[in-house]
Amino acid sequence: MPTSVELAAMRRAIIISASGLGATSPNPAVGCVILDATGRAVGEGYHLRKGAAHAEVNALAAAGARAAGGTAVVTLEPCNHEGLTPACHQALLDSKIARVLIAVMDPTSRGEGGAARLRQAGVDVQTHVLEEEALVVLGPWRASLWHQRPVLHLLIQTDAAGNATAPSAEALAEIELQRHAHDLVISLNGTAEEGRTGSHGRRFSVPAHPVPDEPEDAVAALTEAGARTVLLVGPSTLGERLLSKAWVDRLTLLVPVPEPSQATTTTPAPLLPDGYVLSRITRAGQQLVVSAERR
């Protein structure tokens, strides 16, 4: 069983893994913490962006020789193949790591996974450690693999009657907050731009012209570009059509804060479409920010 120190290290790995959101796709955002043989944290790292060193390699580099005989705490199963970067399970073996704790198993493993190879080499491996918590970060990536398309997040502002309106200052602030955790943002004019930009230049081959309004064509273009998560700003024809096909995975609505007491003689229209459950509610100025996930 993981110790309290190891669980704390896993939560730290989960938290820092989110630093890579919006920059690692089509790869996942992963975090890693290295504990030395006495259980003291001696290194940590995360996957910065596609093509860069993976979380385990960065954490091992920080730990140096202190990793020998220690424990690697990682949010995703170490990879077992060489791609743009070396296989992480081998980096752990080369550092003489004695124990590895994994939160989420990698569904993209080629052949036997990194966990199996570590065990074959005599490393003590525990899996599914705080898996549900790790899926707070890795969930959209895994869902994208499952659906074979990007996870789609639609953000809409409405008036008191439930009609979609142009984004207010509160909505624009929410869009700015959300964009950095998404690979692409489709704006009101239908063009796609990278949610998070940096000195490494463009990472997605999305055309400058508007994304098609037909859901099948739009999703095909976004998938081909390599995006795992896409934020759509409404109101838009594409957003409405994706909703009608039940392809919107997450829905965020900004609705006006109501009066504290209102007389009514009618049943209010449902705020959320069928099939969605509330996941987050907060207040921003005179707007309620309501998020829901598709079941």
Image (cartoon, rainbow, N blue to C red):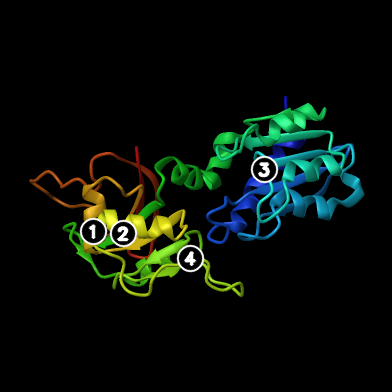
Q: Tell me which amino acid carries mark 1.
A: Glu
Q: Classify mark 1: residues with Cα within 10 Å, few (<14), some (14-19) or many (20+).
A: few
From the image, tell me which residue sits under label 2.
218
Distance, label 4 to label 1, CA atoms, is 20 Å
| Mark before the other along the chain sequence, 2 or 3 | 3
Residue 94 in the image, given as x and y percentages of width and height: 85, 43
> CB of mark 2 within 8 Å of CB of mark 1?
yes
Q: Residue at x 23, y 45 (%)?
A: 273
Q: Is residue 286 left or right of residue 82?
A: left
How far across and down, in percent of the image, does residue 21 sit?
55, 57
Task: Identify residue for label 1.
Answer: 214
Asked where in the image residue 48 lies, by quadrant, the reply is: bottom right
**Residue 241 percent across, percent down from the top left:** 22, 54
The residue that mark 4 highlights is 204
Label 4 to label 3: alpha-carbon separation: 23 Å
Mark 2 surroundings: few (<14), some (14-19) or many (≥20) residues within 10 A: some
Residue type at the position of mark 3:
Cys
Q: CA distance from mark 2 to mark 3?
A: 31 Å
Assign a secondary structure to mark 2: helix
Tell me the quarter of the picture where residue 253 sits: bottom left
